[in-house]
């Protein structure tokens, strides 16, 4: 089924059921550059693949969604939901336009690769959770499709890692520090997320990157700015 057929089939639906798609309004023309509007935020350039790796609770989803926020100002952003955990508010909070968020649920690794390829081929930005059982060749094909179609692609494996060389930039969770909790009590004010960055996006080096996350506004890069100076997109 093509992207157009998916859109036609589910046009106007507001409730997303397993295997269904909630479609936004019409997309903008593809291509062009992104212009972050929040100083210190970051974005993923068209045609690049970002991998976010690590266990739940380290802000992987928010970091990945934030990388696609500026793309949502130009066209739809799809989230391929394997676990069924995504709350759309998490995307809206980091700046993704509400009417341009598409959620596709697919936890079966057999059709997953086909669904992911359809989205990457037809949309300007895709966040894809990767199920256990996804093959390396499938992931490399997705990265190539993203480059060919100038789609910003985020891969988030549910378990394990993404093979070397698939991603332009790989972020692996390294730690999280909470602010405002005091000695185990008090009001949480935010958290600082730490990642180890590797890949071509950091010139083949290993770099520590930190983000400030206050929960209800876009993430802010606070260190490791060599990967993307404020006001520029990765890639």
Image (cartoon, rainbow, N blue to C red):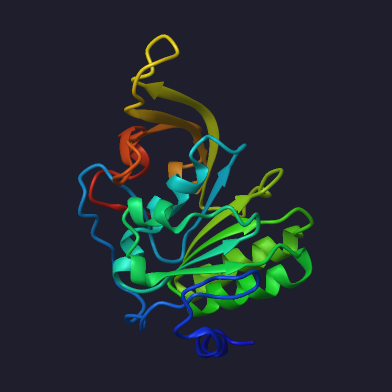
Please state which of residues 176 and 149 is positioned toward the viewer in this rendering. Answer: 176
Picture layout, residue 19 above or below residue 200 = below
Query: In x, y percent, where is residue 35?
Result: 23, 60
Query: In x, y percent, where is residue 112?
Result: 70, 68
Q: Residue at x 56, y 88 (%)?
A: 9
Please state which of residues 226 and 92 is positioned toward the viewer in this rendering. Answer: 92
Picture layout, residue 213 above or below residue 123 = above
Picture layout, residue 26 above or below residue 219 = below
Looking at the image, the residue that sits furthest to the top is 183
Please state which of residues 58 and 105 is positioned toward the viewer in this rendering. Answer: 105
Locate the C terminus and report the quarter of the image it occupies.
bottom left
Q: Residue at x 31, y 44 (%)?
A: 216
Query: In x, y percent, where is residue 221?
Result: 32, 38
Q: Residue at x 44, y 45 (%)?
A: 63
Is residue 206 left or right of 139 when viewed as pictured? left
Locate the N terminus and report the quarter of the image it occupies.
bottom right
Q: Give the number of callouts.
A: 0
Query: In x, y percent, where is residue 25?
Result: 36, 81
């Amino acid at each position: 089924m093509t992207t157009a057929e998916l859109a036609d089939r589910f046009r106007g639906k507001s409730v997303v059921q397993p295997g269904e798609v909630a479609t936004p309004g019409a997309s903008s023309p593809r291509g062009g550059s992104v212009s972050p509007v929040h100083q210190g935020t970051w974005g993923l350039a068209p045609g690049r693949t970002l991998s976010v790796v690590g266990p739940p609770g380290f802000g992987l989803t928010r970091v990945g969604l934030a990388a696609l926020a500026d793309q949502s100002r130009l066209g739809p952003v799809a989230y391929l939901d394997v676990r069924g955990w995504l709350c759309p508010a998490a995307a809206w909070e980091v700046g993704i336009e509400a009417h341009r968020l598409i959620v596709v649920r697919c936890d079966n690794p057999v059709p997953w690769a086909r669904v992911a390829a359809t989205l990457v081929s037809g949309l300007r930005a895709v966040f894809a959770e990767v199920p256990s059982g996804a093959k390396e060749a499938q992931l490399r094909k997705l990265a190539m499709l993203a480059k060919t179609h100038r789609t910003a692609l985020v891969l988030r494996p549910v378990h394990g890692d993404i093979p070397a060389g698939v991603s332009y930039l790989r972020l692996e969770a390294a730690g999280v520090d909470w602010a405002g909790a005091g000695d185990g009590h008090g009001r949480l004010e935010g958290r600082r997320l730490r990642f180890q960055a590797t890949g071509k996006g950091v010139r083949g080096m290993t770099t520590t990157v930190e983000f400030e996350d206050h929960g209800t506004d876009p993430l802010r890069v606070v260190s490791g700015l060599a990967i993307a100076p404020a006001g520029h997109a990765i890639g």
